[in-house]
């Protein structure tokens, strides 16, 4: 165990970005947090890889959107957020849900459409929700949940509770109206909300730069709402964690909203149906060499963490994923009694007498 | 008992609920400082302050998203969408998010919120500020849909909507804001899903909603002068729907007429006719008839708008002709 990793972060920067333009948060990451970040990222990577295998076996139906390569962002917020904070995720939300401590079996079961799923199979991959862990939902219409996060933040502000709402979204979201409505109202009402743009360079299949008026789709818009420009290396777990903590602290202490643009890369396609063949080979190679987990493992080893310790984290994650898969496969599909349940909060669905 | 306008009833209803429960908050465009563009929320900002009565930018998605997020975390928000036509710019929040999330999450979240909106025509506002869109809402599972016709019903049904644990779309009729009615003193709380029989007659049953209710009543009076006695039912609540009252009243007279302000296709009356056809067909003495706005956008000119929306004269002549055939 290292004493701490308190030397400055080596933000070499993600491919294609001038490192001097990146946000450099203050502070350092203690060793326990560093290991927790590594553990989070490894669990996400192994879960998503297994989810992909299960698609290939047709055990996961419908569609699914993986965040392979983007783990540092969800991991950082998972560690930086406090109990009672609210997560609002997108249809690419497996990692963000796991990050808050939701059961892996519950998430896997939901992907498989089994009754052990966190939504008993009624929501599916794109709508993961676990209120008991602060996961207030995963939303599949681009931009909607930014507005909903406003309400959770408003509610905390109204009651004087030190809670923060965090909304994750992709670069494509920055071009829909709900994004702009949300930023404006959050700023005007000084709401405790953190907007986290995961810029993975692609709006579904389209390079974000070809459909956006500015180079940095979120960061370059921050000024329009009186917010600080924050462009951060989304593949650097330490930079992400410290940035998350800074913005969460600001929100929690009445400083209002933040907009973070985390530059990262989606190493898989947009969805199950997309092999991602439109990505240039050199771009893929450059980002493969800038993998958040590889970067972090190397950094931890450099700080004196033993390979055995990191291997043990990986083995535990393997075992957790295997257990979740076995349990989810063994769980029965939801029964007919679930079909008409919970349209209303009394559990029913009746619309007439 | 005192006489109150429909718009005054809206303000009194909101105040009644905000007085009762500190978790009730109210947001919308021009609802505070301006007292609402229809002057239906006058005095609320002064009485409850800017923390509970919040003026918003023109951001309908943000208004409804904020209401949804607040409702799922313990508040009971009232959101205003100024004109019901504007639901079209924030329908994602209504139809995809608020309506579905309880079901999709297996009941993990619920949405005790009310969205109130100025609905309907007759004010020469043209096609984008005059529609009756309650049938849009009725078509979405997970929404309750209410449309009162009198000041007393505004207060009672609004209170029921605020206290309901599920999302309620509360359609106020713009053409009724200036209308007056007797309102009991003290707290008023009604029940969602209850239709009201306003008049009874053995020959025909006229079923109406919102601004069509006073027209149905006037038509029934005129028909009485021509020897046709009609029952008038105010549906009041489309979801939940009081089918028992409707089936009973249609069975009693044997003739069913709906008076609907919405354009023809898929109006609420179509659903009622289908329920009647399935469940009390043998009680009918003739075909059910729907009296609606033609399937057109509403025109602006007063002469044209008056031709489009069912008038007392059209209701009378349609029913009279049907009863004679």
Image (cartoon, rainbow, N blue to C red):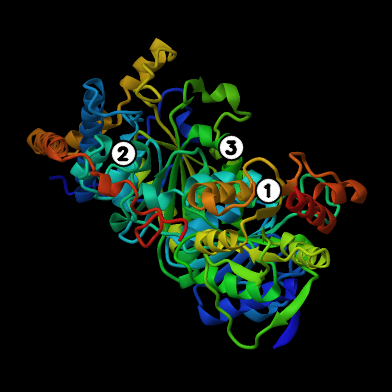
Percent position of residue B159, x then y: 56, 73
Nearer mark to the viewer, of 1 and 3 = 1
Disc sitting over residue A176 in the figure: 3
Left or right, A296 with respect to B221, comes to left
Q: Chain of mark 1?
A: B
Question: Callout 2 environment at 10 Å: few (<14), some (14 to 19), or many (20+)?
Answer: many
Percent position of residue A127, x then y: 37, 42
Percent position of residue A312, x then y: 8, 37
> In this rendering, do the residues under marks 1 and 3 share a single chain?
no
Q: CA distance from mark 1 to mark 3?
A: 44 Å
Name which residue lies at 55% across and 78% down.
B189
Left or right, B8 with respect to B136, comes to right
Name which residue lies at 55% across and 75% down.
B190
Q: Chain of mark 3?
A: A
Left or right, A79 with respect to A311, comes to right
Reply above or below: A118 against B250.
above
Disc sitting over residue B234 in the figure: none
- Is any part of residue A191 visible from this angle? no
Name the quadrant of the N terminus of chain B.
bottom right
Q: Nearer the viewer, residue B38 or A196?
A: B38
């Amino acid at each position: 165990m290292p004493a701490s990793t308190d030397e400055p972060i080596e933000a070499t920067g993600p491919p294609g970005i001038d490192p001097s333009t990146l946000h450099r948060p203050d502070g350092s990451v203690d060793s326990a947090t560093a290991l927790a970040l590594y553990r989070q990222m490894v669990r996400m990577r192994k879960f998503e890889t297994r989810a992909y295998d299960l698609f290939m076996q047709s055990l996961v139906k419908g569609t699914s959107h993986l965040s392979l390569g983007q783990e540092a962002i969800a991991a950082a917020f998972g560690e930086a957020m406090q109990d009672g904070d609210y997560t609002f995720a997108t249809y690419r939300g497996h990692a963000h849900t796991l990050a808050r401590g939701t059961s892996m079996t519950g998430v896997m079961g939901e992907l498989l459409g089994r009754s052990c799923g966190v939504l008993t199979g009624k929501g599916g991959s794109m709508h993961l929700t676990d209120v008991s862990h602060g996961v207030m939902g995963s939303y599949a219409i681009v931009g909607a949940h930014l507005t909903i996060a406003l309400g959770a933040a408003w509610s905390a502000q109204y009651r004087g509770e030190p809670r923060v709402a965090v909304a994750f979204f992709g670069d494509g979201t920055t071009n829909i109206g709900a994004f702009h409505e949300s930023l404006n109202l959050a700023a005007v009402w000084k709401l405790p909300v953190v907007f986290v743009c995961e810029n993975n360079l692609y709006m579904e299949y389209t390079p974000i730069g070809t459909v956006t008026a500015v180079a940095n789709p979120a960061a370059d818009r921050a000024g329009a709402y009186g917010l600080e420009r924050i462009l951060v290396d989304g593949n650097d777990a330490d930079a992400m964690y410290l940035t998350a903590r800074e913005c969460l602290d600001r929100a929690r202490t009445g400083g209002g909203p933040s907009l973070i643009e985390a530059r990262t890369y989606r190493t898989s396609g947009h969805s199950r149906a997309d092999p991602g063949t439109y990505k240039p080979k050199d771009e893929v190679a450059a980002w493969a060499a800038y993998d958040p987990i590889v970067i972090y493992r190397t950094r931890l080893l450099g700080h004196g963490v033993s390979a055995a310790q990191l291997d043990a984290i990986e083995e535990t994650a393997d075992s957790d994923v295997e257990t979740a898969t076995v349990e989810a496969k063994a769980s029965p599909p939801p029964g007919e009694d679930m079909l008409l349940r919970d349209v209303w909060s009394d559990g029913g669905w009746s619309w007439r007498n | 008992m005192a006489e109150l306008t429909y718009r005054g009833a809206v303000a009194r209803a909101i105040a009644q609920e905000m007085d009762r429960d500190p978790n009730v908050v109210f947001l919308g465009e021009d609802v505070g400082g301006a007292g609402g563009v229809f002057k239906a929320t006058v005095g609320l900002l002064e009485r409850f302050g800017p923390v509970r009565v919040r003026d918003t930018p023109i951001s309908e998605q943000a208004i409804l998203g904020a209401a949804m997020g607040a409702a799922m975390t313990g508040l009971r928000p009232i959101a205003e969408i100024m004109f019901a036509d504007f639901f079209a710019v924030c329908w994602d929040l209504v139809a995809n998010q608020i309506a579905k999330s309880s079901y999709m999450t297996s009941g993990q979240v619920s949405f005790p919120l009310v969205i109130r909106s100025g609905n309907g025509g007759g004010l020469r506002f043209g096609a984008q500020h005059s529609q009756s869109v309650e049938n849009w809402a009725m078509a979405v599972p997970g929404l309750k849909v209410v449309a009162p016709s009198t000041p007393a019903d505004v207060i009672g049904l609004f209170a029921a909507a605020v206290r309901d644990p599920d999302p309620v779309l509360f359609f106020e009729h713009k053409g009724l804001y200036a209308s007056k009615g007797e309102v009991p003193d003290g707290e008023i709380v009604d029940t969602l899903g209850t239709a009201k029989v306003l008049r009874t007659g053995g020959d025909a049953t006229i079923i109406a909603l919102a601004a069509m209710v006073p027209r149905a009543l006037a038509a029934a009076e005129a028909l009485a002068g021509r020897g046709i006695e009609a029952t008038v039912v105010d549906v009041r609540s489309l979801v939940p729907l009081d089918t028992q009252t409707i089936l009973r009243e249609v069975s009693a007279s044997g003739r069913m007429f709906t008076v609907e302000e919405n354009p023809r296709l898929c109006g609420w009356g179509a659903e009622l006719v289908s329920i009647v056809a399935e469940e009390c067909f043998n009680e009918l003495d003739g075909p059910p008839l729907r009296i609606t706005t033609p399937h057109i956008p509403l025109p602006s000119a007063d002469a044209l708008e008056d031709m489009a929306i069912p008038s007392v004269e059209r209701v009378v002549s349609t029913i009279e002709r049907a009863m004679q055939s």
